[in-house]
Image (tube, rainbow, N blue to C red):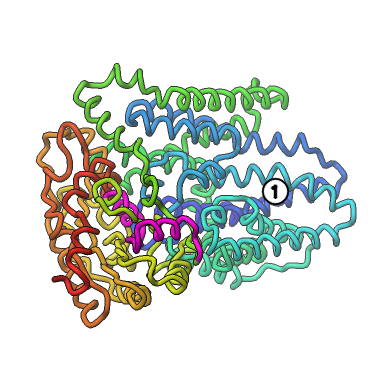
């Protein structure tokens, strides 16, 4: 293959937005598309190598895997090994156990599946996972296992049919990605079947260039770079991805690859020495940045500021330069005598992966070296950790016995609901997201109401319904049996109904990512999303009595602060925090005027006061910043006594 400096420059275009996105730098909300640029480049380079070997009848699967092992494994194993002492020094047992599980997945080339099953890429918790970024390496590794034999087989049919076969895979994967985006977003994001088309586009670029039918263009690479830049600037976590939206950065990358081999301003820009230099070390920079960011966030009581994150970004580049020079290059080019032979390389690689696997398995088996951590840590920290550990071990939703239960899939003729109705008469239904689940648990543990059914699901809000939410099914149930419930109580998280600078739509990070001593910005109610809720709830209220249980005042004290500050610290809400929630409540109440929907202020009913309503030295009442712990459900549930209060009051509130 002819070396192209602009391709290395394109790697820099890929890695820089990813790093700045993970650093939380404004303006790079779509920086995650840098991974898609990497996928196209990888598909192009790998296929170019394979086509050259196939064309000369010298294809060797062992030689191919030797090249991949030299390119990928040394730096990956080295960075993972460097993470081990940092994890031991900074993390607590539960975090070490999760890190160990991800380390084990990395060693098995399975980390994309691990993170699909255990987290979301855009979750707040994702920022605290040092190896989250290895999901993309797993996708590529799985591609490397499957694609060379596939290409070798279809090549036997002729070049034309090989192009057809790859094109069919690309189109099928793209259609699958588009279909999965709304229904299975996590699987769509993390797994190879819905990502293969991006690598396949790169493979088709290799076919096109090997055929010699594409000529360089001075303007097409500019268009490609503009498409990538537009995706970085315009996309965010709300963008269904990957899907047809991913065509913007993917086809932009293809334009640079296809038409960037000659002269032109874009090629000169990508070929500048600093840009090429960053591209050369881009793999190591990608490996280093996420662990640095995650450990900094884990080790800090409050989220690191922008200056710290920019400094860590530069540190990632510096470490990348060192690991490229002293780890990547010796392995890649066989500079060290021990690594020159293929058998030795495979042996050392297998030994390194086995070490990661054993270290990961040991961490999982020991619960994050819990007993050792307990013995070596200060007594106060151990006591605080036990409190936090008790909260984390609790089940988020307890399905009660008899007629206090969660309904996963409402049906117009649900036999359990019908049996409870026949026995107790009309019941109480709980509707909403994970806060509604908290509410059901509080009612289930403290009320004497005999028939309470929860239809609440985490992530389910009427203003942004997801495929697994059952709002339509609940309406159908009420339509079929309007006498089933005499009262429906709705609750959802308040921050999702706010907006403000940097947050077009509400998200947990609005409060969770704020330093504990920083005032809450002047977030305002998102009236559009409030009205969407009202439009749905009005349909429920037309069939039975409905009460909107107002958003709770969320403290958002991070667990790592509680771990270090302890139970005697005078925890207080951030400045302006109560006022922001008061404005939200007032807006909801005002917009409910004239509707059949009643409103009840949770904050006035509970009278939240901190620090006494956060924790004491025996128990913590909150989990994850805005949810009730099991003890909190009992503690606050005694203040609510909702069914009795509401059913005694009657529809007119008297």
Inspect the magenta stretch and tell me whether residue 644 lies in it: no
The quadrant holding residue 289 is top left
Q: Which residue is drawn at 26% across and 68% down?
A: 547
Please indicate, yes or no, whether residue 584 appears anywhere in the rendered image: no
Residue 210 point in image, percent of width and height: 77, 58
Q: Nearer the viewer, residue 16 or 480?
A: 480
Assign a secondary structure to mark 1: helix
Q: Is residue 442 left or right of residue 342?
A: left
Q: Which residue is drawn at 27% across and 74% down?
A: 597
The quadrant holding residue 295 is top left
Crowding around mark 1 (Cα neighbors within 10 Å: few <14, some 14 to 19, many 20+) is some
Q: Is residue 370 left or right of residue 581?
A: right
Name the residue carrying label 1: 46
Please indicate, yes or no, whether residue 197 appears anywhere in the rendered image: yes
Residue 518 point in image, percent of width and height: 16, 52
Q: Nearer the viewer, residue 15 or 599?
A: 599
Inspect the magenta stretch and tell me whether residue 414 lies in it: yes
Residue 265 point in image, percent of width and height: 54, 67
Residue 100 point in image, percent of width and height: 46, 30
Q: Residue at x 36, y 23 (%)?
A: 370
Q: Is 388 rendered above or below residue 632?
A: above
For the C terminus, the image quarter is: bottom left
Look at the image and give the residue range highlighted in magenta: 413-442
Q: Nearer the viewer, residue 314 or 590?
A: 590
Q: Which of 628 and 137 is in front in this view?
A: 628
């Amino acid at each position: 293959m002819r070396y192209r400096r602009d391709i290395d420059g394109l790697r820099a275009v890929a890695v820089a937005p990813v790093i700045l996105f993970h650093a939380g730098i404004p303006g790079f909300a779509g920086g995650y598309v840098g991974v898609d640029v990497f996928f196209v480049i990888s598909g192009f380079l790998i296929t170019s190598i394979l086509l050259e070997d196939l064309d000369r009848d010298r294809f060797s699967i062992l030689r191919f895997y030797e090249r991949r092992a030299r390119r990928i494994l040394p730096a990956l194993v080295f960075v993972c090994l460097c993470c081990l002492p940092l994890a031991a020094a900074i993390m607590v047992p539960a975090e070490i156990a999760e890190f160990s599980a991800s380390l084990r997945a990395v060693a098995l080339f399975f980390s994309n599946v691990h993170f699909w099953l255990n987290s979301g890429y855009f979750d707040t918790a994702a920022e605290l996972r040092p190896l989250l970024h290895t999901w993309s390496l797993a996708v590529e590794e799985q591609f490397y296992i499957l694609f060379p034999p596939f290409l070798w087989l279809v090549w036997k049919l002729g070049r034309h049919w090989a192009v057809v076969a790859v094109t069919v895979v690309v189109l099928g994967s793209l259609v699958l990605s588009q279909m999965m985006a709304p229904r299975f977003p996590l699987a769509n994001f993390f797994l190879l079947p819905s990502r293969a088309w991006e690598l396949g586009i790169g493979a088709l670029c290799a076919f096109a260039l090997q055929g010699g039918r594409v000529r360089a263009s001075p303007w097409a690479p500019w268009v490609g770079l503009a498409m990538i830049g537009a995706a970085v600037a315009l996309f965010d976590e709300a963008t269904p991805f990957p899907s047809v939206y991913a065509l913007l950065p993917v086809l932009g990358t293809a334009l640079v690859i296809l038409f960037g081999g000659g002269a032109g301003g874009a090629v000169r820009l990508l070929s500048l020495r600093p840009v090429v230099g960053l591209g050369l070390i881009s793999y190591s920079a990608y490996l280093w940045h996420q662990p640095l960011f995650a450990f900094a966030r884990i080790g800090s009581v409050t989220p690191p500021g922008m200056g710290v994150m920019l400094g860590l970004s530069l540190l990632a580049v510096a470490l990348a330069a060192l690991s490229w020079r002293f780890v990547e290059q010796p392995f890649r080019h066989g500079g060290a005598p021990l690594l020159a032979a293929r058998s030795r390389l495979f042996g050392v690689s297998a030994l390194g992966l086995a070490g990661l696997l054993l270290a990961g398995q040991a961490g999982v088996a020991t619960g994050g070296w819990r007993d050792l951590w307990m013995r070596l840590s200060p007594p106060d920290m151990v006591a605080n950790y036990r409190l936090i550990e008790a909260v984390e071990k609790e089940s988020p939703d307890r399905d009660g016995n008899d007629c206090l239960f969660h309904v996963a899939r409402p049906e117009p003729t649900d036999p359990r609901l019908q049996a409870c109705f026949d026995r107790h008469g009309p019941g109480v239904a709980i509707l909403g997201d994970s806060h509604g689940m908290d509410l059901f648990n509080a009612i289930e543990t403290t009320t004497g109401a005999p028939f309470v059914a929860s239809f609440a699901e985490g992530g389910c809000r009427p203003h942004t319904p997801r495929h697994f939410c059952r709002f339509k099914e609940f309406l159908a149930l009420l339509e079929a049996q309007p006498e089933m419930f005499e009262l429906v109580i709705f609750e959802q998280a308040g921050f999702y109904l706010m907006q403000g600078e940097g947050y077009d739509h509400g998200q947990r990070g609005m409060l969770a990512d704020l330093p504990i001593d920083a005032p809450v910005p002047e977030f305002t109610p998102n009236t559009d999303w409030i009205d969407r809720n009202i439009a749905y709830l009005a349909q429920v209220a037309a069939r039975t009595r409905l009460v909107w249980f107002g958003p709770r005042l969320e403290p958002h004290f991070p667990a790592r602060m509680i771990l270090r500050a302890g139970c005697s610290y005078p925890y207080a809400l951030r400045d302006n925090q109560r006022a922001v929630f008061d404005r939200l409540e007032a807006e909801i109440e005002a917009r409910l005027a004239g509707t059949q929907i009643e409103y009840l202020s949770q904050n006035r009913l509970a009278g939240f006061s901190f620090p006494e309503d956060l924790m004491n030295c025996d128990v913590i009442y909150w989990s994850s910043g805005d949810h009730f712990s099991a003890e909190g459900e009992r503690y606050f549930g005694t203040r609510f006594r909702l069914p009795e209060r509401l059913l005694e009051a009657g529809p007119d509130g008297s």
